[in-house]
Image: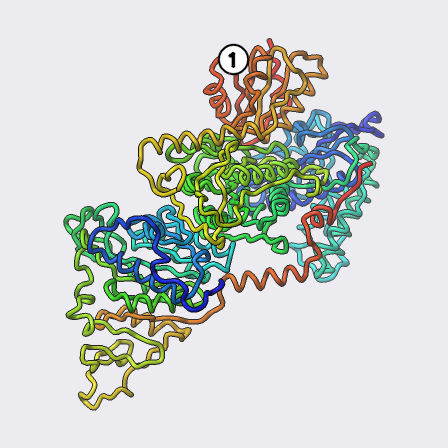
Amino acid sequence: MIEAKEEQKKQILEQVVVRFAGDSGDGMQLTGSQFSDTSAMFGNDVATFPNYPAEIRAPQGSLYGVSGFQVHIGSVEISTPGDDLDLLVAMNPAGLKTNLKAVKPGHMVIVDSDAFTKKNLEKAKYESNPLEDGSLENYLVIEVSMTSLTKEALKDVQGLDNKSIIRSKNMFALGMVYWMYNRSKEHTIDFFNKKFKTKPELIESNTKVLNAGYFYAETLELIPNDYTVAPAKMPAGTYRIIMGNTATAWGFLAAAEKSGLNLFLGSYPITPASDILHELVKHKHFGVTALQAEDEIAGISSAIGASFAGDLAITTTSGPGLALKGEALGLALMLELPLVVVDVQRGGPSTGLPTKTEQSDLLQAMFGRNGESPVILIAASTPANCFNYAYEAAKLTLEHMTPVILLTDGYIANGSAPWKIQSVDDMPEIKPLIVKEGNPDWQPYDRDKETLAREWAIPGTPGLEHRVGGLEKDKLSGQVSYDPDNHQTMTDIRAEKIKRVQNYIPELQTEFAQEGDVLVVGWGGTYGNLYAALKDLKQSGAKGVGLAHFNHINPLPKNTAEVFGRFKKLLVCELNTGQFASILKMQFPQTRIEQFNKIEGLPFGTSELVKKINDVIE
Amino acid sequence: METTTNNKYTFKDFASDQEVRWCPGCDDYVILRAVQKALPEIGVKKEDVVFISGIGCSSRFPYYMDTYGMHSIHGRAPAIASGVKLANPELSVWVITGDGDSMAIGGNHFIHVLRRNLDLNVILFNNEIYGLTKGQFSPTSLVGQKTKSSPFGNTQPPFHPGQLAIGAQARFFARVGGNTPKEMSQVFIEAEKFKGTSLIEVLQNCPIFNDGCFSKYTDKAVREDMQLFVEHGKPMIFGKEKNKGVVLNGLKLEVVTLGENGITEADLLVHDAESQDPTLHLILARSEYPLVTGIIRSFPDVTFEERVNALVEEVKANSSFTKTDDLFFSGETYEVN
C-alpha cells in the first residue's frame, strides 16, 4: 500500500472514472446512478455502465454475483463510461477481485474491511487476505469498517431490523465519494424523501448513513479532499439524465403525439428490454395502450392488430424474442402495415448472456424471416439518441408503410447520459398515410409513386372495407394472387420500397478525417467508444484516420460507397464476429475491409481500440 | 359500435366478390351463410365489422365477407384481434379459427384471450382433423382415429373444446351443429350481444378427410333425439316427441322420460347459463347423451376493455400531464448556460 502523496491532493481533474462493486444485493446500481445524477446536476458530462449478473440475488460473496456500476464524469466531453478506474469502491472481496485489474496503478481503492472475513475470502477464492499480504501495494487502499460504522450511525434509529441496517452501507460509501469529489448530498436526500415517503424511518436511516460516510471521509486524513471535476462545456439548454430505454420509450411517445395517433405497445418481459414496457405503462394519460401479452408472438401479433386498426404500434424485445417474432414480422411486411420492432440486443446465442451487451442480432434482424422479406433497419448509438431513433423509426414506418426494426443494445439501453431535452414542437412532422373516405376507385395496394407506400384504410372507414392477409397479394387489389408475374413484381416492389428509403435518411458523415488511410467503421451502440479512441489518436497526432458510424443499416445511406472510396481501407469494429462487415462485403465487394471483433459481453475499451487502429495504420 | 336501423342490410351485402373455394358439401358454407344472415339482424354497420382468421380451411373465411378482414398467420388470430379491439373498442371483432389453429399451434393465445375477456366473438370450426394440410390428426381427433399421420390410430387423447374453454375462464361458451343454420345464426347474434369473449364451437363436418365425424349427433334423422338445445331459464327438454328431459343425479346428468315414473316438467333441470359457478356448464359441455347445444354458459362479467378504460380514466384524472413536453421537462432537470 502507498500513502497519499502531497501532489495527489488538491487536484482539479478533467475527468474521473469511478466504479462501485459489491454483491448483487448491495445496491451498487442505486449508488452509482445517484453519483452520476448528482454529477450531472453539478454540470458534468457523464456516462454510465451498469454491469450486473443475471441472478437477482446471486449467492452472497460469490465472484459471479458481483454487481458493478461505473460512472465517468468530466469537465470535457464524455463519450464512454471510461476504461481504467481512478477509484474503485469494493464492498467485499469478490468485488475487489473481479474489478481490481481495471484500476489505474497508484489509484485509489476503498474497501469495506468488515466484509473481508475468512468466509468471504474463501468465496472470492483468495488464498490469503489481500489487505494483509502486500498484493495491493501498487494501489492506494483505504480500508473502512463500513458495516460497523453504518451500524454505529444507526444505533439510535428506532424500527430498523438488522438487514435494513446492513443494506444501507452503500450510502456510507456514496457519502465518502460525495465528499471526495465535492458533490452536494442534496439530490440524494431529496431522492430518499420521495422514495420512502411512507417509511420515515428509512428516510432517517439512509440520510444518517450518507452523512456519516460524508463526514467520515472529511475526518479521514488519508483521503485527498480536493478531487473535483469542474462543470463541462455543453450546449446551452435544459437537460436531464436519461437511460437509453427511457429515451426509446419517450421517442415513441413524442412520435405518437406528433402523428396524432395513439401508441400501442404489445410486449412480453425480457431482459434487457423490459424497462421500455415499464416506462410506457405509466403513460396511459397520453393515450398509450401497453399490453403485456402471453408471449413474444402475442406481443407482436397484438401490435399488428392495433396497427391494422389505426394505432402507432410497436413491440419491444431482445434477441430470443426477435427470433419468436420472425413469422409475424413477415406478415406485417406482407400486409404493408406500420410496425416498429425494438430489439435491445444482449449476448447470445440462445439465452446467452442476458444482462451483457452484444451486437450479434444484426443478421437476424436483417434476414431472420422466411422468404424475401426486407425491412427497414436502424440502430441507435447513444443512450440519449435512442430518443431520436425511436422517433425516426416511427416516422419511417408510418410514412413508408413497412415494418422497421430498431436495434439498441444492453450497453446503451441501461447506460445513462445527459439529454438536452427536445420539445415535441421542434421534432420533424410525421404524416401517416391514412385514407379518410371511400373513393370508388380506391385500391388497397395502390401506391405512392415516390415512396411506393400504400395507403392505410382503417376499419370504421365507410366504403373502404377490404381484406388483407399473408398470402401473396395482387399488386393493386390486394386479393390473393398465385400469378407468377405478380409474385415477381410484388417481391421487387417490397425490395424497392426499402431501397427508396435512402432518399429520406441523412447521408453518412465522417469525423476526424474526410479522407486518408483508414476509415474506422462502426454501427449502433459502439459509437462512444469509437469516438473516444479516435479522439485519443488525434491527440497523439494520427492523421488520415476517419470515423464513419452507421445508424441506418437497411438501406445504407446513399453516399456510403463514395465515402468508402476516400479511404485506402476500412476497419469495421463491432461486438460480434463480423456481421456488419459481411453486409458491407456483400454490398461493396471492391472495398478493402479489415475487422476488429470482440464478443465478451462487454463494450470496447478505448485502449484496445487505439491499439488495434494503430496496428492497422502500420 | 353504431347500429343501423330497420335492417338496412341483407345477407348479400356481407358477401364479397370473391369466389368461395371450400370443397363441395363442406359445412363451412353453412357457417358463412349463417354469419352473413346474423349480421343484418345484429344491425352493425359494415365498416365497423372486422374478421380476423388464422390458418386452415376455416381461415379463408374473411376473404368471403365484404367487411374489414385479415387472413393472418397460424394460431395468432386471437392476439391480432385483441390488438384490433384494444385500438378501437367500437368495432365488432370476430375471430375465425379451427381446431388445429386454436388448440394446437395457437393454444396459448386461445386460453389467454378467454381469460382476459375482451369483447370478441370467436367461431371455432371443429372438424377433428387437419383439412388444409390434407388429413392429419388434430388436437380434437379421437384416440384410435386413423389419419394420414396416424395410420395405425391416433395415440394422443383429445382436447374437449368446451372443457378447455371453461377451464380457461370462458364467460360465454356455445355449441351448434354445422348443419343447423337457424340455430347457428341465433347463437351468433347472442354471442355478439354478449359483452366479453364469446366462444362458439361449430361441429363442422369435413366431407373429404373426416366425413361423418359428428353424424351420430347431427344427422337429420337423429339430431332431435341426440341433441339438447339449451336456452337460459328453460327446462331441459329434448327429443322428437319433446318428451325427454334431463335431471341431475349426484354429479351426473340423467335422461328421463316425461310422464314415466311420475316425472313432470317441474322435475327437470332449468338451464342457468348465467351462473358464475361453471360446474354445471362443464357437465353439460361434456355430456355425450344428450349432446348439449345452444348457449351453455353466458356469465356476464367485466370486460378487459372496461377494466382498461376505468384505469385510463383514473390515471388521467390524477395526472397533470397533457402533452409529452410536460413529462420531458418534469422532475429533475437542470440548466446549462
Q: Amino acid at mark 1?
A: Arg
Nearest the camera: B216 or B240?
B240
In the displayed structure image, the side of residue A27 where residue B131 appears, left or right: left
For the N terminus of chain A, the image quarter is top right
Quadrant of residue A371 within the rendered picture: top left
What residue sits 40% from the left and 75% below the top?
Answer: B275
For the C terminus of chain A, the image quarter is top right
Is disc 1 placed on a helix, strand or loop? loop
Q: Residue A119 at x, y = what percent? A: 58, 43
Quadrant of residue A559 within the rendered picture: top right
The outermost residue toward the bottom is: B262
What residue sits 69% from the left and 20% below the top?
Answer: A535
Nearest the camera: A348 or B48?
B48
Nearest the camera: A256 or A213?
A256
Nearest the camera: A500 or B141?
A500
The reply to whether residue A210 is in sight is yes
Q: Write down the chain letter for disc 1.
A: A
Q: Is residue B53 above or below residue B230?
A: above
Q: Is residue B232 above or below residue A450?
A: below
Q: How dense is the environment of label 1, judged by Cα within 10 Å: few (below 14), some, or many (20 and up)? A: some
The outermost residue toward the front is: A440
Q: Residue A282 at x, y = what percent? A: 62, 53
Q: Is residue A221 above or below residue B186?
A: above
Q: Residue A31 at x, y = what percent? A: 69, 43
Q: Which residue is mark 1?
A: A592
